[in-house]
Amino acid sequence: MPPFIKGLLLGTIAPVLAYVLTSIFRAHLSKPFVLYAIAALVNLLMLRYFYQRQQEQPARGVMLLTFIGAMVILFTHFGLWTTT
């Protein structure tokens, strides 16, 4: 498996898990955004891990997924994506 694809797959785990937990426990969470913040923190820790070991391609995959995930959250949860 190419290192970039490995980084993309690893970077997907935390945001998807946060989305699933938020969907399941939406009624019980007072601040669901906290789970997304934890997912971003996990991805940033993975990013640091890869860069410290000089593995740039997996780090780029994790970084790309973190950026895309942040944009999706901004557009969907904060009303920046409007249909008129």
Image (cartoon, helix red, strand yellow):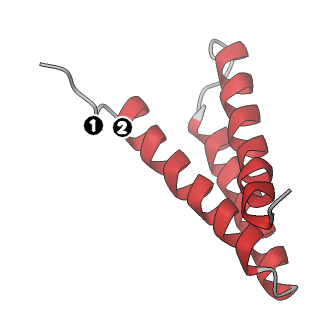
Residue at image mark 2 = 75
Question: Vertical placement of 59 versus 11: above or below?
Answer: below
Q: Is 57 placed left or right of 63 in the picture?
A: right
Which amino acid is tagged 2?
A: Phe
User: What numbered label is drawn on residue 80?
Assistant: 1
Residue 34 in percent (x, y) is at 64, 42
User: What numbered label is drawn on residue 50?
Assistant: none
**How many residues crowd around disc 2 within 10 Å: few (fewer than 14), some, or many (20 or more)?**
few
Secondary structure beneath label 1 = loop
Give the image quarter of residue 66: bottom right
In the image as oriented, which residue stretches furthest toward the left? Answer: 84
Question: Vertical placement of 9 versus 32: above or below?
Answer: below
Q: Is 52 placed left or right of 34 in the picture?
A: right
- Which residue is at 69% across, 61% downward? 62
> Gap in Å between the C-alphas at discs 2 and 1?
4 Å
- Which residue is at 62% across, 65% downward? 63
Secondary structure beneath label 2 = helix
Which amino acid is tagged 1?
A: Leu
Residue 21 in percent (x, y) is at 74, 25
Residue 43 in percent (x, y) is at 72, 59
